[in-house]
Amino acid sequence: MHKKEVQNIIRLFFGKRFSKEAQLRFRYWFRSEEDHKEKEDTLREVWEASPSVTTEQTWEQLAKIRVRIVQNKENPIPVRYWLRYAAVAAIWLLTMLGTWYFSVQPAKEISPKLTEFYIPYGDRQEITLSDGTTVWVNAGSVLIYPSEFNADTRTVFLSGEAYFNVAKNPEQPFIVSTQHLDVQALGTMFSVNAYPGASETVATLEEGSIQVDVKSAEVPVSVLKPNEQLVYSHETHQFRVNKVDAEQVSAWKDGYLIFKDATFVEVIVALERKYNVTINYNAEKYKERTYYVKFNPDESIEDALTILSHLIEHFRYKVNGKTISIN
């Protein structure tokens, strides 16, 4: 495994709440001899760059930097910049490793091999996991999964958006773990949208059934039916269940972008991911309206902008390479 992959796996766990099994899997991998030097170098870089004093804002600062790292994979932020805020993360990691010996439930014989599957802006890809589950991963997303599913559950970790067609195995539930939600399925088709920095995490069921557990709130587990969507607000820590057309929600995997009652920001962010561009605009100018619009797979970014110009009065834009300015 390359050092960059080791770093990304370690950093994915910073500041997030994962299940006990997920924590044990990570600890087992971290303590294994595989890629020992890369792991040691990563931890040393974090530790040496830590400030002598941390504040209660440290976690928030680290989270913001993590979001920027994911959004700027092609032009990553220099390591020296974000490590200023990593002291708490380093302390968390050391504490977690120290308490590993005292875990009530010992680590199971599971594969220590974790694989990172990153999709940059401007792309989307399909992958087949070892159990036969197929996953479409959207632009700007990271999926981390074991090479073999040898535990009681088949747990994968998602930051971003993905569509899952899960291979049936009632004896080994399939779980998608995100920062705010755990989505469990036995054999089904569903999508999860959990981009860093977004205001909501969304799980949408197309076929079968899924069980959605909100990590940070004492609320009952929700079981969704086909064409139901659970939307969890990061700000209010509340969720709602909507009726939707699940096939339209996951149409991005076929190259479509379909919006119903979407804000201007939601439309622009999706276009940035699909076309790998940066769009500058005045958010205040467009915040009052919502939009119903569909973009087809064969349309270019200029085609999409032309469509928006027909929908929005006085809409003007200028393209300069991969940077677009909207008046």
Image (tube, grey):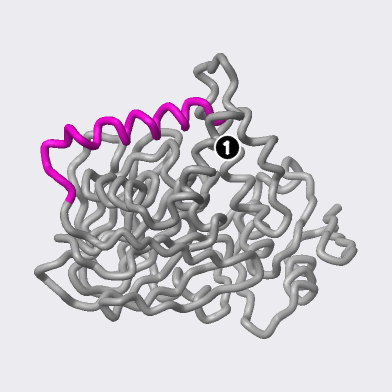
Q: Position of residue 102 (x, y in %)?
A: 17, 32
Mark 1 highlights which residue? 45
Please state if 275 lies on the left or on the right of 209 as rendered: right
Q: Residue at x 53, y 30 (%)?
A: 47
Given the image, on which type of amino acid does mark 1 rest?
A: Glu
Q: Is residue 200 visible?
A: no
State whether residue 227 is above or below residue 281.
below
- The tally of labels here is 1
Is residue 100 inside the magenta stretch? yes
- Chain part drawn in magenta: 86-107
Query: Which residue is painted at 28% across and 35% down in the image?
Result: 217
For the stretch drawn in magenta, the main secondary structure is: helix
Q: Magenta stretch: residue 108 in it?
A: no
- Residue lying at 62% horizontally and 48% vertically, measured from the top left: 69
Disc 1: CA contacts within 10 A as few (<14), some (14-19) or many (>=20): some
Q: Quadrant of residue 206?
A: bottom left
Q: Is residue 169 above or below residue 14?
A: below
